[in-house]
Amino acid sequence: MVGRLTSMSARPVTLGARALTGCEHRVALDHLAVDEATGRRVELPEPAGVTRRKEAAALHRTWVRDLMADQHIDDWMDVAGTADGSRAAGTARAIAAGVGWIWNAVPPIDPDGRRGGADGLVSDGAGYLPVIVVNHRVTVPVPPDREPDIAVPPAMTSPLWSWLPVPDPTRTPRLQRRDRMRVAQLYRMLQAAGWASPAQRAGVIGLDADCIVVVDVAPLLAEHDAVFARRLAIARGDVATRPSRVGECRSCPWWSVRCGPQLTERRDVSLVVNGSQVTALRAAGVDTVDDLVARSDGPPRDWTGSFADAVTTAKAWQHGVPLVLRTRTPTVTRADVEIDVDMESFGEDGAYLWGVLRTDNTDPDDAPGYRGFVTWDPLPTADEGRNFAEFWTWLTAERRRAYETGRTFAAYCYSQSAENRWLLASADRFGAQPGVPTRAEVQAFIDSPDWVDIFAAVGANFVCPQGKGLKVVAPVAGFGWRDAEAGGEASMEWYRHAVGLDGGMPDVGQRRRLLIYNEDDVRATKVLREWITDRAAIDIPHRDDL
């Protein structure tokens, strides 16, 4: 049983850069939580989804390592392969030898307790600067016809084959906060070791691995130092923290064994509101769900969002109600010919599957039919463009045929952001291939009333105390997925095996599994839409009736 938090001030505490972003209370739990039975510090296994993301990131780092080794064969050392097995000792020897590109480097833990490894260190002639490899994109392209944005300067980049930083007007930097904190931490460690370049720069190689994005570290150091000092004090037990539900909780191993039960027992207000709303309520003395329901003074100072929705969510939590109607008569766009669409992508590499479910409501003998437009060539692949063209040609033909025969038409998805992103990206990337629409054609479809977001319809018709995800809402309408493990995280692993990304034979069983998962997603959207029209007003209480 996970018990108390115990101060560890008497022992040395070190922090890696991962502890500098995200939940502060997790830092305390990771360092201070003690098992009541053994008196030992508790260490929990990571959730499967986190493990999968780490494995994918490790594979990307290995691929980039091999790419960089080929570029710098005459001035290169990978200290992970040093004879004594110590990366720290190997790093020190490589630095002493003046090696230009050092991979898998580990600077010494600095006197303040910073620890961590750099994917690479590169010499600029005056010292070394850290390079990290991340499994997401770190720049976005600047459209050639867009005016320069003074507030967002162009990225500074260097080619992979040499350290030659220059402004790149074709890209805008998109570094995540954890990337900035990590390079600042590594630079401080290099400073403490006496190895840092006075240029105060770092490099980041992203998913595309076509350049090194150059980071000016100087503006990051003050924030890093303040965050590091506070988090180190938390890890030592010198600063108290408290649990609060945040987005990170979904993938945190502490949620089910510690924070979730504690917050539920306390009936904590963070269970029903988010972010700045929690801060505003607690500042007003509203700490529990019951306090929120009982509040008669209206929203507190600095409140953002709908206070009425927050109160309704709190009431629903009290009664164990999964959905609450906003309106007595819920509505959603319906049509004679209805096409449900769901896209499956693999990270940032592309969209390999466009699944569709066609329903003709004018012909009772025409049973709804699923079709998956799919490429099993491992992404990235030009065959993605061929597959997208086939999907788009089929969709637009169905739309045109409906209107030519005097029937109405609508295509549906659940949360347009992902589908819209890959619709537009596919047009941009594969525009030269036969059958691929222009970006303008795709945008016109997205902007038309024929493209309907059921996620938006759920938000318009319901207050959703447990979230608006399809896996949360569709079961209320009576839908269940055939695969108990169905979900975005799991599908990434299935895809790896389906196409043999790890070097094995492609797994036909995992391909079938992905198609079943995709089919269930579009069928869930159809069931939910029809339930909103036909039964939601009967099955779900109205907010005024709670």
Image: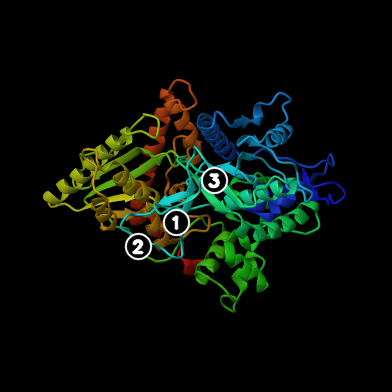
525 left or right of 116 in image: left
Seen from the viewer's position, the closer of residues 392 and 438 is: 438
Q: Are marks 1 and 2 in contact (CB under 8 Å)?
A: no
Tell me the amino acid under the disc marked 2. Glu
The vertical placement of 346 against 3, above or below, is: above
The mark found on residue 147 in the picture is 2
**Image spot of residue 203 (x, y percent):** 56, 46
Q: How many marks?
A: 3
Q: Secondary structure at mark 2?
A: loop
- Distance from Cα at disc 1 to Cα at disc 3: 15 Å
Q: Residues within 10 Å of mark 1 (few under 14, many from 20)?
A: many
Residue indicated by mark 3: 204
Colour theme: rainbow
Q: Decide if residue 432 is in sight here.
A: yes
**Image spot of residue 353 (x, y percent):** 35, 37
Q: Residue drawn at (64%, 46%), measured in percent from left and top?
A: 126
Q: Secondary structure at mark 1?
A: loop
Q: Residue drawn at (73%, 58%), measured in percent from left and top?
A: 230
Q: Decide if residue 258 is in sight here.
A: no
Tell me the amino acid under the disc marked 1. Pro
Between disc 1 and disc 3, whose residue precedes? Answer: 1
- Distance from Cα at disc 2 to Cα at disc 3: 26 Å
Tell me the amino acid under the disc marked 3. Val
**Image spot of residue 319 (x, y percent):** 57, 60
Residue indicated by mark 1: 154
Residue 457, quarter of picture: bottom left
